[in-house]
Amino acid sequence: MSWLVSIVDRADPESRPAPAAVEARKTQLLSLWSRYVRPVTGCGDGDFEDFYEQAVRLEAALGSFGADNVWLQLSSNRETAVNAGTGERRRASDLDHLPLYGTQPSRRHEDVDMEQARLAASYYRYGAFLARAGRRVEVCGFLPDDPSARDLGDVLAGFAADGIRRAFLKTTRVKYAAFPVDLPEGFAREDAGQVVYGELDFGAMSLEGGTENIIAQEFVPMHYEYRVFVVGQTAVTAAGCIEEFTPLDNNGYRFDNKLRRNRQDKSAVEVEPAVAGILTGFARNAVDALAVEVPGLTDYVIDVALDAEGKPLIVELNSLLNSGLYASQPVRVTEAMAGRERELVL
Ligand SMILES: Nc1ncnc2c1ncn2[C@@H]1O[C@H](COP(=O)(O)OP(=O)(O)OP(=O)(O)O)[C@@H](O)[C@H]1O
Ligand SMILES: [Mg+2]
């Protein structure tokens, strides 16, 4: 079974002192990269996390699929795929029927077959999410042209009238904008325009007139954010959302238990087995509910957290292939994918 493995061709990373075991892992990854991508020293000026994330993806793909089954497509030359085992070169477009692994380049998930990414990005429509969101969530449009469409101004004015003093707005367009807004008493529907233009400036123009392009949420504190990787509707690995961590920081557990209480404030990282256990159990329950509701959605990441009272909630769902790895074990993802393909072939 062959795979198209898409790797972002990162620059030689800066050096960062690490314990001996991690140094040994870095050496392995640097030599793998030097063999399959381009010679690197580990003492360059490239970004540390970005490089090692890509190197670990490459390592996981080669290990789980087998080099002969990996058609490597580098971001520096997207037209060509090279067989990692034989060195054979093919036009990447001739291989686009193959299952995909690795970072996918499409911003809007449209130019490659990314059904999974599309289904994950619609998370805010799923009852299984809404029942576990731990906050009010409403989809609406920013100054919609269609008079019958749900208007952001009405949603925010409704929140304010119900005593909600802070909201969190996110565009339905992936990674376009996400920001909190204050809702002073007496906030009126007409105030919404200023709020969005104040935050996004000209970026608000492309939203204006649309329907269902904003996810308006009640703002709730989110603690111990945790990313759970799901393959075949099964949680396979997970790690705390700690931006400076990579799989090099994994503590040997499939479900890493290092957590940061406050992602936004970059508070201290601590080992929290009990919290990681609660979050994993909660995520598994959500994954089961999503499997019933959206059977086509099989591979994704689900971010979960605890609210101010310690009750778990879902932050969001994202595409599996493009999500940051943190201190997870990516080889669990590739193993699960390879296992599924073997089942299909048998
Ligand atoms: N309703 C909310 N109330 C308070 N904070 C929130 C809310 N929703 C999200 N956040 C915070 O904002 C962050 C970003 O939100 P989210 O993950 O939904 O968007 P995103 O576009 O994926 O951004 P990022 O790439 O930073 O994760 C979350 O990780 C969480 O810390
Ligand atoms: Mg996020």
Image: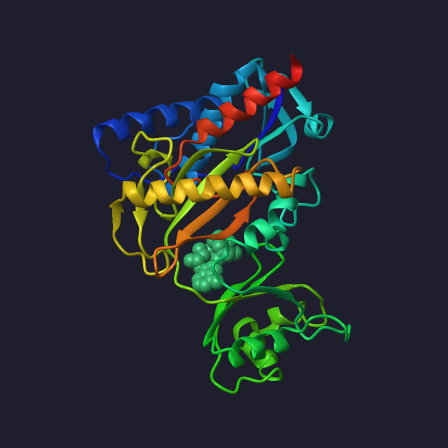
Q: Position of residue 300 (x, y in %)?
A: 55, 40
> In this image, 232 relative to 42: left or right?
right
Q: Is residue 299 left or right of residue 241?
A: right
Looking at the image, residue 217 sits to the left or right of residue 48; the answer is: right
Residue 131 place in picture, x, y as percent: 54, 54
At 31% from the left and 54% from the top, the residue drawn is: 261
Q: Quadrant of the N terminus?
A: top right
Q: Residue at x 40, y 36 (%)?
A: 328
Instruction: Specify whether residue 46 is in view.
Output: no
Up-down: is 10 above or below 123? above
Give the percent coordinates (x, y) of residue 188.
58, 85
Residue at x 37%, y 35% (from the top left corner): 255
Count of numbered circles in the view: 0
Above or below for 171 versus 300 = below
Residue 158 lies, in percent from the top left, at 57, 77
Tell me where residue 83 sits by quadrant: top right
Rendering quarter of residue 176: bottom right
Name the one closer to the observer, 171 or 275. 275
Task: Give the camera-side residue of 2 and 77.
Answer: 2
Whether residue 334 is visible: yes
Residue farthest bottom in this picture: 186
